[in-house]
Image (cartoon, rainbow, N blue to C red):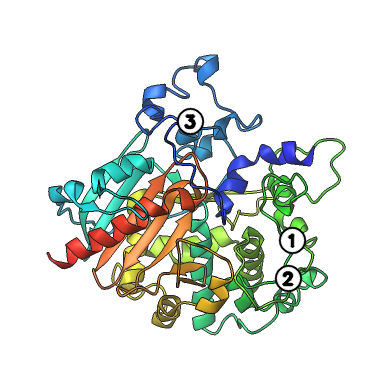
Amino acid sequence: MLRMFALQSGWMILGATLLLAQPAMAAQGKYPDAVASDPAKLGWMVGSPPPADKQLRFDDGSYFRFPAMRWSVANFRQLMPTVNIPRGLGNAQPLVQAEDAAIDQLTFMPTGADKPMSWEASLLANYTDAIVVLHKGKVVYERYFGVMSPTAQHGVMSVTKTFVGTLAATLVAEGKLNDSKTVSHYVPELKQSAFGSATVRQLMDMTTGIRFSEDYADPNAEVWAHAAAGNPLPKPADYKGPRSYYEFLQTVKPEGKHGEAFHYRTANTDALGWVLARVTGKSVAQLLSERIWSRLGAEQDAYMSVDSTGTPFAGGGLNTGIRDLARFGEMIRNDGRANGKQIIPLKAVQDIRAGGKQSDFAKAGYQQLKNWSYRNMWWVTHNAHGAFMARGVHGQALYIDPKAGMVIARFGSHPVAGNAANDATSLPAYQALAEYLLQR
């Protein structure tokens, strides 16, 4: 029962979670390709009302079955309760267009492949929904697919975590949050949970020792209890579990020791969101609007999904326009400055770029991310360009290459949730584009 109820919150689970070892079940032969699954061509939710076989619903989980989810990721606000993240009343910061048509024909060698692939082909291979590339602040590439457009918004899934981690790093740099304090120092309600004895820094870098399985094949895995708690729909009459994200966090049990290894677990970000709310007296959504979105020169408001008590889903509930996600990346590339303002303290940006302990990260076993680390909920490559990124399931990405002066914002709806399914083509493509832009 718990698993079935939680499945109604499918996007909350999948959008929150980066699967560690999900096989790269490439779409070849198993799923319709990007052209055949194009949500605009399939006509989901078109009509007044749509035909019965084209209707998607939140309450029965139909909205997140592939290929229907290719429509849903760009229309979450129509399906579930959300809270707005205002952009403020100022003018949008202009993005100068300087498109380079040659990028489509740029070639690279996918990891493990024996023949090259073009940049243009990689976008279809990865079920790209929208992508914007900035080079030194100018738009050199911008494409939209399916139901996406410059004015549409899309779920960023676990890229949400990076925003929450950046907010925490900001408060630490400003001296308003002490990352060496325990979580229970700020949130006494978590004292008896596994989070209580962890430090805020261990939350920020996901080195907590908590029992939180994200094995979807196990109906008793904690991820299902987490999703059921956050499901905003009325609970079944016989439901006895936690009824909100905050209630769920208080039930998390210890497993292992804090500070010994990196473990990617969505519950860490929800706990960090609670810490931020307690420190500032504002929800994550309010904080994101006041500290970043309203100062960024964004074109659109953003929004976040919420649980039944209105708590924003810090682990994966953010939705934005692709151009605004690129603006956020450009601000980070420019040492926290945008729109004539220092939005994120330089100290916080430097801490993000430095990365975390590679030895801690190595214990997680990411085969395609050798020598990477995790810091402030950013993924740091430690490559020669000093690149770092935000990552979300089904292909969401924000990739920043300081040496090349490049920012890539990408939305996707790959049928396989884990990034292992697209890293082999995405990461080499990003590197190839960086090398090309360095020569301009």
Q: Which mark is residue 67?
A: 3
- For marks 1 and 3, give the one nearer the viewer: 3
Residue 433 image position (x, y, % from top left): 24, 58
Residue 192 image position (x, y, % from top left): 83, 70
- For marks 3 and 2, give the one nearer the viewer: 3
Residue 398 image position (x, y, % from top left): 39, 59
Nearer-N-terminus badge (3/2): 3
Local SS, label 2: loop
Q: Which mark is residue 195?
A: 2
Q: Which mark is residue 264?
A: none
Which residue is painted at 46% across and 67% down in the image?
379
Going by the numbered disc 3, the residue's amino acid type is: Pro
Quadrant where the image shows the C terminus: bottom left
Which residue is painted at 50% across and 42% down in the image?
416
Q: Nearer the viewer, residue 148 or 87?
A: 148
Nearer-N-terminus badge (1/3): 3
Quote the CA–CA distance across marks 1 and 3. 33 Å
Nearer-N-terminus badge (1/2): 2
**Is 320 situated above or below 404?**
above
Quote the CA–CA distance across marks 3 and 2. 37 Å
Label 1: how many Cα within 10 Å (few below 14, some 14–19, many 20+) = many
Which residue is painted at 37% across and 54% down in the image?
112
Residue that mark 1 sits on:
249
Local SS, label 1: helix
Residue 155 image position (x, y, % from top left): 48, 46
Disc 3 vs disc 2: Cβ atoms closer than 8 Å? no
The answer to whether residue 297 shows anywhere in this view is no
Relative placement, left or right, of 138 versus 51 is left
